[in-house]
Amino acid sequence: MSSPDVNLNLNVRGMGQSATVAINDRSNALRKEGREVFKLGLGQSPFPVPSSVVAELQANAFQKDYLPVKGLRELRKAVADYHRRTQGMACDTEDVLIGPGSKELMFLLQLVYYGDLIIPTPAWVSYAPQANIIGRHIQWIHTEKSDQWRMTPAQLEAVCRRDAGRPRVLILNYPSNPTGATFSADQLQALAEVARRYKVVVLSDEIYGELHHEGRHVSIARFYPEGTIVSSGLSKWAGAGGWRLGTFAFPRSMQWLLEAMAAVASETYTSVSAPIQFAACRAFRGGLDIEKYLHHSRRILNALGGWCAARMEAAGVSVSPPDGGFYLFPDFSACARATRLRSRSSSEWTENLLEDTGVAILPGSSFGRSDEELQARLAYVDFDGGRALYASQSVTEPEALDEEFLRTFCPNVTNAIDRLAEWAGH
């Protein structure tokens, strides 16, 4: 019996799985085969969901009704209060939209808002594919290592000046996936001035904001409140990636955009899981237990990220210490192995690294860089976060976590970086 004809939309023909999902599936398959694999590919929080939030989920497991498309009112209020409390935003319940992960909300935004997408590279793997699926034009801004991969106001100005009246959405992600870098308040203010001048809609992806290593995250919404949509969720700072809950906070002047996205949501996913929305209220309301959890999460990630960067720098790999999150974006062009690497694409040599050492990382080409560049992203998350959190609480404050602590409680990451450094140096 012959197969029926398959007619695929041109925008998805040839599209594979998201690179981060694919590397995780590959790593798991290799482990099942008995291979030793260090999973530095998927950016999943290593820490458990705070116990008080888990208890709230358990208490609301009976919740079975469809909730409002925009989200549970109590949760929308908690999110609005959170943004007012942490960033001083003039945010109210009616300015918040809840979705099944911020990833889905980003897709709806691009679907509803007709405009070009400005993406600074290196950038998270799904921004551009979403634009391609919908058929939006992408304007790339290639940042430089000398700027620690941060987009500059001059670069944004140069893009916006061309066809100045064209509607555009700028995606600004900080602390960054994949670089771990963030912006200072002065840098954000300078970018805000350019965005305001050209009436650019800023999608401020702050999913890693609470994981700023010093707890000092600043939102561009402070400087461009009328044009900024703030994206957040539970996946990174609350360890609840699999719960799939994301939030958008809109300026009041963009209520029309929120309503349009909610209309599309009503015809697609209807509403987010009820028990998870009730539990999320507890996370966004915060409290001493949440602050303690975040303090020790940041402390561990700060120490581990700094150690990883220093270890690789000593091996001749160029990498900046991270400001937040749990990523590094090393450049291997100056290391001893660079001469041989130059004959291979970034995807080829990261595959070679996996075969030689068991260290799974992603090539820079997955993040919008040229396949000829010798860059990659690694996520230093392959450790037991619950065990590390418990151990951190017993280390006298404000004593920093030392190498012995990291090798004891984050052994997969330290062993992986040792192997990576040795591989790069040969």
Image: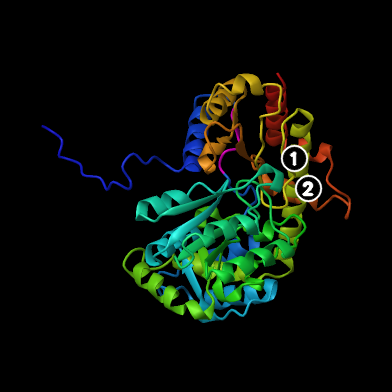
Q: In this view, does 324 lie above or below 319?
A: below
In percent of width and height, residue 192 lies at 63, 67
**Distance from label 1 to label 2 (Cα)?**
8 Å
Determine whether, in the image, residue 377 is placed left or right of residue 165: right
What amino acid is at disc 2?
Ala
Q: Is residue 250 above or below residue 418?
A: below
Q: Quadrant of residue 52?
A: bottom right
Q: Which residue is at a point 33% across and 64% down the rendered structure image? A: 268
Neighbour tally class for label 1: few under 14, some 14-19, many 20 plus, Cα within 10 Å: many
Determine whether, in the image, residue 408 is placed left or right of residue 5: right
User: Which residues lie in the magenta part?
Assistant: 37-42
Tell me the element at label 1.
Answer: helix
What amino acid is at disc 1?
Phe
Q: Which residue is at a point 73% across and 65% down the rendered structure image? A: 185
Tell me the element at label 2.
Answer: helix
Q: In this view, does 120 lie above or below 423?
A: below
In percent of width and height, residue 10 lies at 28, 46
Quarter placement of the C terminus: top right
The residue carrying mark 1 is 409
Mark positioned earlier in the residue sequence (1 or 2): 2
Report the front residue among 88 and 64: 88
The residue carrying mark 2 is 391
